[in-house]
Image (tube, rainbow, N blue to C red):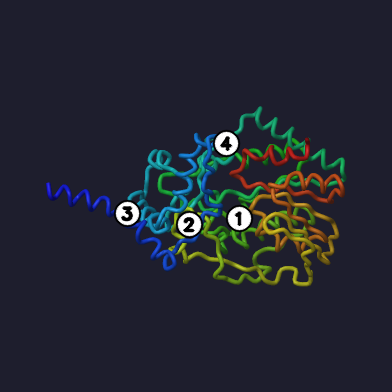
């Protein structure tokens, strides 16, 4: 009986101790929000919101649980020890938002209508002939819309990270040997329409032979990956292309860790590589005319190509800004959450070139993003 009481007391102490110690230690431990989202607010308490109250309280508490980052790190490290070299079935059954690959590499592997990167990787989601035809017809309409305004339309697709660094994906999860869904779509569109479309996969695979193109602990490409992408655009639009040998590459300490943040292991992920590009169009001077952090950027430069470019984009274009701004007289970047704003700009003063940048895994957003301009 005594042992039972001791066990019960020990159990309740384990539950209560974090709450007791946290107020005393919170200023001395890592309690930063690494999830790149605002934590849930305390829910409104009223008769009208009574049904949603339990879920709201749970979300509020989960975001502020004592020692959250420390417990997340411990859980992540335990999973790393247990889940090494999963079979394909085990991988698919247990896969969550972040997949932990080999040698510490992390991947965002959502499965859903909007983002489906793992099936892009496995190659089991290819378009049917009818779907390809519909997709091509749709983008032809988008291109015709811009053509009527005197604007050149370009579809630009950066690849999912695992398409470039498949060698670090978990064992027995093999990438498709043949054509994948994006390759299939871009090939069909360019062959059956006059739409200009770029899928940057092959160029980045070539570039990685010299330098790392994507961050190890982040979803995004680094500055060099973005540079390679910009060179594909300038080759298409200007007939000019610079290789990695034509620039100076400087290694930096700055690099992305958004996936590490989701796992609560940012503090453990300090062995990645960041880069800075030097010697690229040094004679071109760029001025930031207008800026709304993360949403809107308008640049002017003395580039010899005086055309105006509007880029409608997701987060992958952020690393492209510094390079692309040097290539044209005016370049404006508008985040994909601001479709109405972009359409208003196009209606009032159509650009010479419109670039629609969409990351490969966001296939469910292709038509949605372009559709802003057909309404």
- Residue position marked by numbered label 2 in the rendering: 260
- Residue position marked by numbered label 3 in the rendering: 16
Q: Is residue 35 above or below residue 94?
A: below
Q: CB atoms at circles 1 and 4 under 8 Å apart?
A: no
* Residue 204: image tag: 1
The answer to which of marks 1 and 4 sits earlier in the sequence is 4
| In the displayed structure image, the side of residue 77 where residue 221 appears, left or right | right
| In the displayed structure image, the side of residue 298 where residue 124 appears, left or right | left
* Residue 269: image tag: none
Kind of element beneath mark 4:
loop
Q: CB atoms at circles 4 and 2 under 8 Å apart?
A: no
Q: Is residue 284 above or below residue 155?
A: below
Q: Quadrant of residue 209?
A: bottom right
**What is the C-alpha distance between the residues marked 4 and 2?**
24 Å
| Front position among marks 3 and 1 | 3
| Front position among marks 2 and 3 | 3
**What is the C-alpha distance between the residues marked 2 and 1?**
23 Å
- Residue position marked by numbered label 4 in the rendering: 113
Kind of element beneath mark 2:
helix
Q: Position of residue 17 (x, y in %)?
A: 32, 57
| Front position among marks 1 and 4 | 4
**What is the C-alpha distance between the residues marked 2 and 3?**
28 Å
């Amino acid at each position: 009986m005594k042992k039972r009481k001791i066990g019960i007391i020990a159990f309740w102490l384990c539950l209560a101790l974090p709450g007791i110690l946290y107020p005393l230690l919170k200023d001395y431990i890592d309690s930063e929000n690494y999830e790149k989202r605002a934590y849930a607010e305390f829910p409104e308490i009223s008769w009208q919101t009574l049904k949603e109250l339990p879920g709201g309280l749970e979300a509020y508490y989960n975001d502020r649980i004592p020692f959250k980052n420390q417990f997340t790190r411990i859980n992540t490290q335990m999973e790393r020890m247990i889940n090494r070299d999963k079979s394909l079935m085990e991988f698919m059954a247990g896969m969550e938002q972040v997949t932990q690959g080999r040698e510490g590499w992390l991947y965002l592997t959502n499965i859903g209508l909007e983002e489906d990167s793992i099936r892009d990787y496995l190659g089991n989601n290819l378009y049917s002939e009818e779907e390809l035809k519909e997709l091509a017809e749709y983008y032809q309409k988008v291109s015709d819309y811009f053509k009527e305004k005197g604007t050149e339309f370009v579809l630009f697709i950066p690849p999912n990270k695992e398409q470039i660094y498949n060698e670090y994906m978990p064992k027995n999860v093999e990438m498709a040997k043949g054509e994948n869904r994006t390759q299939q779509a871009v090939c069909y569109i360019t062959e059956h329409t006059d739409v200009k479309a770029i899928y940057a996969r092959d160029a980045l695979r070539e570039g990685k032979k010299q330098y790392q193109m994507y961050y190890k602990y982040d979803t995004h490409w680094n500055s060099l990956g973005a540079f390679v992408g910009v060179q594909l655009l300038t080759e298409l639009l200007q007939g000019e292309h610079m290789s990695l040998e034509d620039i100076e590459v400087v290694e930096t300490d700055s690099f992305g860790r958004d996936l590490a943040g989701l796992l609560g292991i940012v503090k453990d992920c300090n062995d990645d590589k960041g880069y800075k590009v030097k010697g690229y169009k040094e004679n071109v001077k760029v001025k930031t005319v207008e800026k709304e952090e993360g949403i809107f950027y308008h640049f002017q430069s003395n580039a010899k190509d005086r055309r105006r470019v509007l880029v409608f984009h997701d987060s992958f274009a952020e690393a492209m800004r510094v390079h692309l701004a040097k290539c044209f007289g005016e370049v404006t970047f508008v985040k994909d959450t601001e479709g109405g704003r972009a359409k208003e700009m196009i209606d009032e003063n159509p650009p010479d070139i419109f670039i629609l940048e969409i990351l490969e895994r966001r296939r469910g957003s292709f038509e949605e993003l372009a559709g802003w301009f057909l309404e």
